[in-house]
Structure formats: structure tokens, C-alpha cells
Amino acid sequence: MTQQPKRAWDVYLKMDTSNESFSLLQLIANDCYKVGSFYYSAKAFDVLERLDPNPEYWDGKRGACIGVFQQVVAGKEAAESLRDVVGMLKNSRNTQVESIIQVMKTWAKGNGIKLA
């Protein structure tokens, strides 16, 4: 995996809150999703969802989190990422969160991965 998503995230973290930082978050969320860098996409959608209750941010976050889960299952992403994703999902108030987390916890337990 290229380090560009991480670099973009690091640039965002150094920015002050502004319209520019919000635009960068949207860019990170959407572009990372498109190229399969679901971890950074999920992080960006998580922040966007907390800043603005737009349902599209939940949809993006849900898809990115499930993408991270798929990559962990396939051995293409570290198990630590799944722990982060569960934490991000817990930040959401959506009714789907518990069922998604339950699937992740069940798989993790069956594969010897501790999420908490």
C-alpha cells in the first residue's frame, strides 16, 4: 500500500479547523474509499460524521469500516486496524452499529484477535 493516504491524514491532523480542513477530510474520505484505502477513509468519514450529521457520511463510514474488516479477514490489513474501526463505529448513533460490531467481534474471537 502506498503511504499517500497516511501522508494526507497527517497533513489534515496538522491543520487548523477551517473550510479547507473540512474539504481535505472530504477528499481523503472519498478518494481513499475509491482506491481501497479503507482505513484512512473510515477515519475521515468518522470525523466528518461527528462534524456534520449528514447521512452520507454514515454510509461512507459504514462502507469503509466494512472494507477494513474485509481486508483484515483477507490478511491485507493489520488486526489493530479492526480495533480502531470498532472504536469508530462506537462513535456512531446509527442503529446498524451494534449488528456490524457483533459480526466483527464474533469473527475476531474465532480467530484469536482481542478487540477490547
Image (cartoon, rainbow, N blue to C red):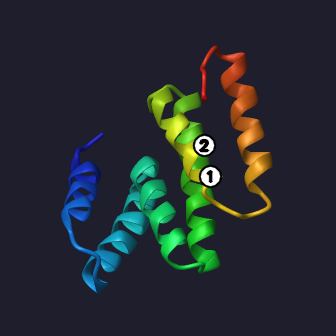
**Mark 2 surroundings: few (<14), some (14-19) or many (≥20) residues within 10 A:** many
Residue 62 x %, y %: 62, 58
Q: Amino acid at mark 2?
A: Val
Give the distance between the C-alpha atoms of the residues marked 1 and 2, in whole angstroms.
5 Å
User: What residue sits 39% from the left and 52% below the top?
Assistant: 40
The picture places residue 77, in percent across and down from the top left corner, at: 45, 32
Residue marked by disc 2: 86
Q: How many marks?
A: 2
Q: Quadrant of the C terminus?
A: top right
Element at badge 2?
helix
- Residue 54 sits above or below residue 32 on the image: below
Q: What's the residue type where badge 1 is placed?
A: Leu
Of 99 and 71, which appears nearest the observer? 99
Query: Can residue 76 be seen from the camera position used here?
Result: no
The answer to whether 85 is drawn above or below residue 20 in the figure is above
Identity of the residue drawn at 70% across and 64% down? 93
The disc at residue 89 is 1
The answer to whether one can see residue 114 in this image is: yes
Expressed as whole percent of the image width and height from the top left, the position of residue 10 reads 22, 54
The kind of secondary structure element at disc 1 is: helix
